[in-house]
Amino acid sequence: MEEKGYWLCENGHEEPIGTAFAGIELELSRDCSTCHKPMKMIRRDSMTGQERYESDKERKEAERVSAEKRAMAAQEAKNATTGEQTATTLRNMATNSRAFADKIRSI
């Protein structure tokens, strides 16, 4: 997104690039459609070295967090599957116990 560029307002709302011609943004300024505050163009090639460093740092942090969340989701799915298997086993045991109790009563 930073390579292509996007608009960012003071409140953190993001909007995609509007009409562009040959990679050049035709709009010089824009107001946020949500809060109507002025927006500024964010594009990687116009960032300073410090801004690029911070952007890369935020991206790496976001990738780390998303990897952790994927791992947690996989663990939760595994736990859910194990819980379903346990419930099925207990249900089958209850059915067998009822069938056994019915046989004893009929004797």
Image (cartoon, rainbow, N blue to C red):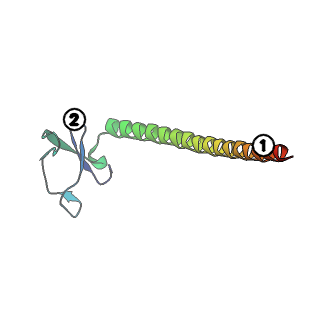
- Residue 85's disc is none
Q: Which mark is residue 97?
A: 1
Query: Which amino acid type corresponds to the residue marked 2 in the rendered image?
Result: Asn
SS for tag 2? loop
Quarter-wise, where is residue 50 in the image?
top left
Query: What residue is shown at x 60% (from left), y 41% (from top)?
Result: 75
Q: Which residue is mark 2?
A: 11
Residue 41 vs residue 36, the one in the foreground: 36
**Looking at the rendering, which quadrant does residue 53 occupy?**
top left
x and y, in percent, of residue 84 in the image: 64, 45
Q: Is residue 46 left or right of residue 86?
A: left
Depth order, front residue of 74/23: 74
User: For the residues marked 1 and 2, what is the alpha-carbon distance in whole angstroms?
Assistant: 63 Å
**Picture coordinates of residue 93, whole percent (x, y):** 75, 44
Q: Is residue 58 above or below residue 22?
A: above
Q: Is residue 56 left or right of residue 12?
A: right
Q: Give 48 or 59, whichever is nearer the viewer.
A: 59
> Where does the image place residue 67, in percent across and percent down from the top left?
52, 42
Q: Describe residue 8's horizontal placement relative to residue 107 as left or right.
A: left
